[in-house]
Image (cartoon, rainbow, N blue to C red):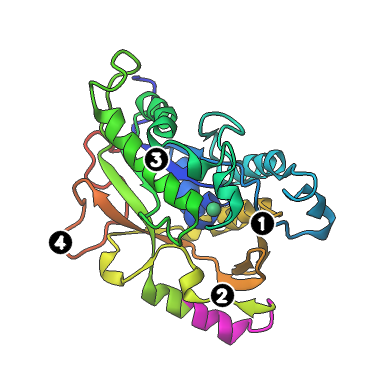
Amino acid sequence: MTDLPARRLLLVHAHPDDESINNGATMARYAADGALVTLVTCTLGEEGEVIPPALAHLAADRDDSLGPWRQGELAAAMKELGVTDHRLLGGPGRFRDSGMMGVEQNHRPGAFWSADVDEAAGYLVEVIRSVRPQVLVTYDPDGGYGHPDHIQAHRVATRAAELAADPAYRAGSGAPHTIAKIYWNRVPRTVAEEAFAHLRATAPDTFPGIAAIGDVPGVANDTLITTEIDGTDYAEAKAAAMRAHATQIALTGPFFALSNDLGQPVLTTEYYELVSGVPGAAPGAREDDLFAGVTGADQ
Ligand SMILES: [Zn+2]
């Protein structure tokens, strides 16, 4: 374990593209700084809608070959971010995209939403005990915006963090490991409001419509935000990673749309809420580093 980099960051996401939208600048920044950045994606996003007409045949209701395609998009995105350690929970295709809440795909065999949380968490415990991250980033309990796979990713990540630390859990398969700090992805409400105002003022006709603030995952009152990662230097890397997810994201300047054609701002400063661990900033101040205060994580 002595050959691991001093700082190790684990991110758990539901589908390929979530990591680039939520954390692209953070991932690029820490990878460039020499930290080990590990991404675990829980499904291949097989149920996603496809934006480019020429690729519409990949969709679940036609060829049902979107999963492997998105695996390629994810690999290309990770290249843009400089992230070399990206994994699929339980291996490719172990858990399938569950579709939006309430559709029949929620309950098809293999759907991530129907998976046993402890069983799915077991795969993540293996990763945690081998990579030994000091920092875990995932979604809030609502998955940021209520998508079943995002909610399940939160549950699995949270459970895995507990189990990985428990010496009695699968004793003998990797030394127990306690993650020092756990964060949820957030967007401060005032930042979202300003960014949407900017979009309406400067590019009102770029997209067929403009998203509502409620469509942005993780929006929360500013007082909940503990941590702000300045990704200005990595804005290009984040944009390139988002462009790599071409079946899912249409990027125009500092704005993007998903398959619903509703414009949203691309945020290059990324925000977090520390929910477990000791804050590395003075009371009332925001951290500017996910590893702030972590013993042994100095550069
Ligand atoms: Zn997603």
User: SS for tag 2?
Assistant: loop
> Is residue 121 visible in this depiction of the protein?
yes
User: Closer to the observer: label 4 or label 3?
Assistant: 3
| Labelled disc at residue 248 | 1
Say which label, 2 or 3, has the lower sequence index: 3
How many neighbours does mark 1 have within 10 angstroms: few (below 14), some (14-19), or many (20 or more)? many
User: Which amino acid, by three-letter code, is at mark 3?
Assistant: Val
Q: In the rendered image, which quarter contains the N terminus?
A: top left
Local crowd size for mark 2, using a 10 Å CA cut-off: few (<14), some (14–19), many (≥20): some
Label 4 belongs to which residue?
A: 283
Q: Is residue 226 left or right of residue 209?
A: left
**Foreground label between 1 and 4:** 1
Q: Give the magenta part as a residue range.
A: 195-207
Alpha carbon separation for disc pair 4 and 3? 30 Å
Residue at mark 2 to residue at mark 3: CA–CA distance: 29 Å
Q: Which mark is residue 211?
A: 2
